């Protein structure tokens, strides 16, 4: 059975690292949602300007489409996408009944330390606070969301997600 997982969370929460480690374990393709941004969005973020809801709309619609296409072709995928607001997650759910979300949850201090130690093509650490300000953590009414603490080794995070059998 094909499925579609969104690895969500703020920048620096480990979406790409976890996605690359998880994909072979559950026989899914990993897609970094950052690579689906328009050049205009990339340029804004590189300049330290947070994206607006309007900026994100086409990007979220493309991510939803990519997930739908995988499932329609009988393949599973994992897409790294911040999905910070409930409205974004609702948009991703449209016509995607096989979708699940994994919220990679961590404290501002932990994630800030991680970002300070890495280089990213267009996500400066100065935008982290705006991401936390925008973040609407999933609530109990979002039953298709698994929350995983990132305050543990990558292997433990991957094992926890794989054991949840979001894609079977």
Image (cartoon, rainbow, N blue to C red):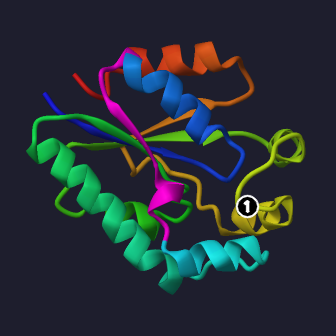
Which quarter of the figure is the N terminus placed in? top left
Crowd class of label 1 (few under 14; some 14 to 19; many from 20; radius 10 Å) = many
Q: Is residue 65 visible?
A: yes
**157 in the magenta segment:** no
Q: Position of residue 150 (x, y in %)?
A: 68, 30
Label 1: element kind = loop
Point out residue 39 in the picture as x, y percentages from the top left corner.
54, 76
Going 50% across and 29% down the picture, which residue do you hit? 20
Say above or below: 167 vs 106: above
In the picture, measured across the screen, residue 1 lies left or right of residue 129, that is: left
The residue shown at (72%, 46%) is 12
* Residue at 48% over, 74% down: 38
For residue 10, above or below residue 55: above
Q: Nearer the viewer, residue 94 or 48?
A: 48
Instruction: Please identify the quarter of the rendering in which residue 60 is found.
Output: bottom left
**Residue at 50% across / 51% down in the picture?**
139
Q: Is residue 26 magenta?
A: yes
Residue under numbered circle 1:
123
Give the magenta range. Answer: 25-37
């Amino acid at each position: 059975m094909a499925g579609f997982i969104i690895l969500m969370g703020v920048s620096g929460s480990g979406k790409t690292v976890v996605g690359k480690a998880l994909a072979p374990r559950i026989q899914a393709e990993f897609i970094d949602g950052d690579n689906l941004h328009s050049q205009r969005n990339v340029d804004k973020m590189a300049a330290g300007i947070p994206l607006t809801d309007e900026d994100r709309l086409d990007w979220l619609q493309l991510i939803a489409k990519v997930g739908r296409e995988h499932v329609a072709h009988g393949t599973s995928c994992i897409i790294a996408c911040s999905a910070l607001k409930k409205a974004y997650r609702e948009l991703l759910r449209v016509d995607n009944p096989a979708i699940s979300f994994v919220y990679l949850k961590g404290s501002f201090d932990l994630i800030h330390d991680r970002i300070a130690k890495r280089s990213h093509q267009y996500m400066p650490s100065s935008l982290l606070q705006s991401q936390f300000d925008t973040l609407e953590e999933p609530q109990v009414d979002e039953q298709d969301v698994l929350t995983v603490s990132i305050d543990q080794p990558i292997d433990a995070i991957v094992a926890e997600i794989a054991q949840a059998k979001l894609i079977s």
